[in-house]
Image: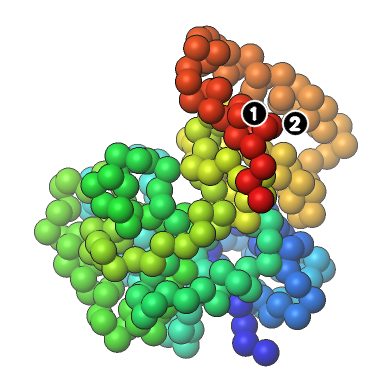
Amino acid sequence: MDNINVCLACDDNYSKYAGVVIASILDNAKSDDNICVYVLDGGITQENKDKINSLKSIKDCKINFVGINNSMFDDYAKVSTNKYISLATFYRLKLSELLPNVDRVIYLDCDVVVNKSLKDLFNSDLDGLAIGGVSDIDKRKVRKNPDYVNAGMLVMDLKTIREQNIESQFLEWTKQNINTIKLGDQEIINEVLKGKIKLLNKRWNVQSSNFVNRSSYTHHPYIIHFVSKRKPWHFGSFSYHKDYYFKYLELTPWKIPAGEKDYWGRQNKIASFFGYIKYRPLFLFRPRFWVALYNTYVKNDD
């Protein structure tokens, strides 16, 4: 049976969140799904590697830690980009080199959770293109480029990337635009492959910030991507779908201790509610709020 290859990139600080992603994948995998996870290792301690490996108790799978020599990314380290984008985010631009024996992979950021078997996504028909993804939540970018995708979930045909020498194109474009790049690897991928990215079902990357700001109001998101700066693991965050994060966190060695459950449960939700009122005191007068309310509680999206 063919593997379903999945790749994440993280340093030690993000190993916990990578663990939640892997737990969500395994919890939703079908019995005949052969999951093979590649973790691009930006400095994960042995203790946290052991914790990640313990997730095999959810469902047997392969977990491979791929050591990274950051000198490979010296040119990308020079990119003048938003400060919250780490060097690890550029790792995906060299996946065909880092995973020389892999022909296709699903790349996931560490701020996502998976709610469905990845088999159908992995087998997506890319129409011969190198990359498939889901439209970005930023409508301004999509208006300029109808195929502009969010890079938090990508189906990458590494064989095609090698054959078309796309990694070199990424690097060359980066060198030519080194001082103007604002959105890191996502901008590089979308500019180099403009018009050559396959758009996939939007449920495979529901970009969720708060109740109003979601890329899709589907009741059945296959993958949830927490795109706001304040993630579910930040107390009082506005993330509408954060209950999913805590659901899968409970399957990991990092699960919340009994004495902290009220803090991260009831108190967290209260802080989120009042925090949002402070952030958007006039939210009841925003048309987008009523659109979100209708789509969430009235409209049936099935």
Q: Position of residue 51 (x, y in %)?
A: 72, 61
**Up/down of 26 relative to 33, above or below:** above
Which residue ends up furthest to the left in the rendered image? 176
Q: Nearer the viewer, residue 160 or 181?
A: 160
- Whether residue 180 is visible: yes
- Disc 1 secondary structure class: loop
- Residue in view at x 35 percent, y 40 percent: 139
- Tally the numbered discs: 2
Q: Nearer the viewer, residue 73 or 191?
A: 191
- Residue in view at x 33 percent, y 78 percent: 161
**Up/down of 123 relative to 74, above or below:** below
Residue holding disc 1 = 235
- Disc 2 secondary structure class: helix
Q: For residue 88, which quarter of the picture?
A: bottom left
- Residue in view at x 42 percent, y 43 percent: 137
Instruction: Specify whether 253 is left or right of 179.
Output: right
Q: Position of residue 29 (x, y in %)?
A: 73, 69
Kind of residue at disc 1: Phe
- Whether residue 230 is visible: no
Spatial separation of the CA atoms under disc 2 and disc 1: 7 Å
Residue holding disc 2 = 264
Kind of residue at disc 2: Trp
- Residue in view at x 82 percent, y 68 percent: 57
Q: Position of residue 177 (x, y in %)?
A: 15, 54
User: In the rendered view, how is the structure colored?
Assistant: rainbow
Q: Position of residue 63 (x, y in %)?
A: 64, 74
Q: Badge 2: how crowded within 10 Å, few (<14), some, or many (20+)?
A: some
Which residue ends up furthest to the right in the rendered image? 258
Q: Badge 1: how crowded within 10 Å, few (<14), some, or many (20+)?
A: some
Q: Quadrant of the N terminus?
A: bottom right
Q: For residue 204, which quarter of the picture?
A: bottom right
Mark with earlier residue (2, 1): 1
